[in-house]
Amino acid sequence: MTEKLKNLLLRLLNAVIWVPVIVAGVIFWTWKNHLLARVLITIFSMVTGVEVGNLLRRKESTLHPAFFAILAGIIPVLTLLAQEYPRNISLYILYVVLVLLFVFTWEVFTYSDERSSGVLPRLGGYLFGIIYPGFFFAFMMMLPLLPYPITAFAMFFFVVMLNDTFAYFVGLLWGKRSNTRGIVLVSPKKSLVGFLGGITASIATVICFYYWIQPQMFGSRNVWYVVVMGLACGMTGIVGDLFESLLKRSVHVKDSGNFFMGRGGMLDSFDSLLFVSPVYFYFMAFM
């Protein structure tokens, strides 16, 4: 069995396992405003944060990956608390300040000649860990605030997953023969035709929900708004995938971890979801 075929079969096995889990979670975890789903998202953020910390540690060995679990969980946890107890928002800002003060104080009191050259890379890495992935995961936690939250959750996942799936298979089938590979140097094996396949899948998914699955979810928005939304989500998902490729290429690793069979770490599977989540939320909530 070739390596490509093995990875393909593992990807299909992941889909068979995880798609029903995600759908079941969206349908059945509605207790107390999707509390269980939001707790799970927080856990995902913390695990992904550790993977980000491990990547950054390859450039700065004095970084502490365990810190990244805490940092990646800050904004999701505060988002969860703000949804449950909205009157305490000013107090939540204090929590962020206290965590930052702890990180800065840690650097002051663990200073040594050996660690001195890594102060700025460490501080930059810790601040990066708050934003990526924590800030982006927080938008996933706000999806239950949308009208028809179960359908909104489902459409979000299908828009991203079908984008990723069609980009992979279209690129695999026609990428090499179309001579459109290498247009993005950070991921030279990915092709323009694959990107177009993924974007087309995202647009088609949103149109399907607009016409046949939950038209009321879009209010008075017309079909062109839906097309632009699918286009924006599709393009953003591709950028999210390429950004994670940039991180991995910068430290010379293939995968961010080994959480999923054939797909690598959790970050490898959530990279597109992270970038699409704020775009999707704002299209559905405000625009």
Image: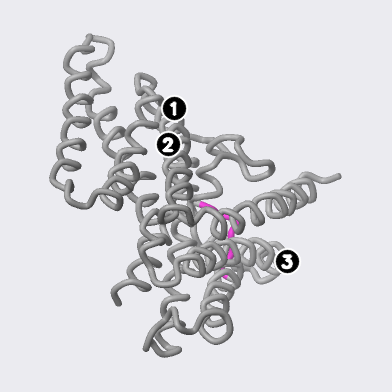
Task: Give the answer, above or below, for where 201 lies relative to 63.
Answer: below
Q: Is residue 190 magenta?
A: yes
Residues packed near mark 2 inside 10 Å, few (<14), some (14 to 19) or many (20 plus): many
Q: Does the magenta stretch include residue 250?
A: no
Highlighted magenta segment, given as a residue range? 187-192
- Marks 2 and 3 sit apart, C-alpha to C-alpha, by 36 Å
Q: Do the residues labelled 3 and 1 touch (CB within 8 Å)?
A: no
Q: Do the residues labelled 2 and 3 touch (CB within 8 Å)?
A: no
Q: Which residue is drawn at 27% across and 22% down?
A: 118
Residue 46: give its label.
2
Residue at the disc numbered 3: 173
Helix, strand or loop under label 1: loop
Of residues 234 and 226, the one nearer the viewer is 226
Residues packed near mark 1 inside 10 Å, few (<14), some (14 to 19) or many (20 plus): some
Mark 2 vs mark 3: give the one in front. 2
- Marks 3 and 1 sit apart, C-alpha to C-alpha, by 35 Å
Helix, strand or loop under label 2: helix
Task: Give the answer, above or below, for where 206 lies relative to 7.
Answer: below
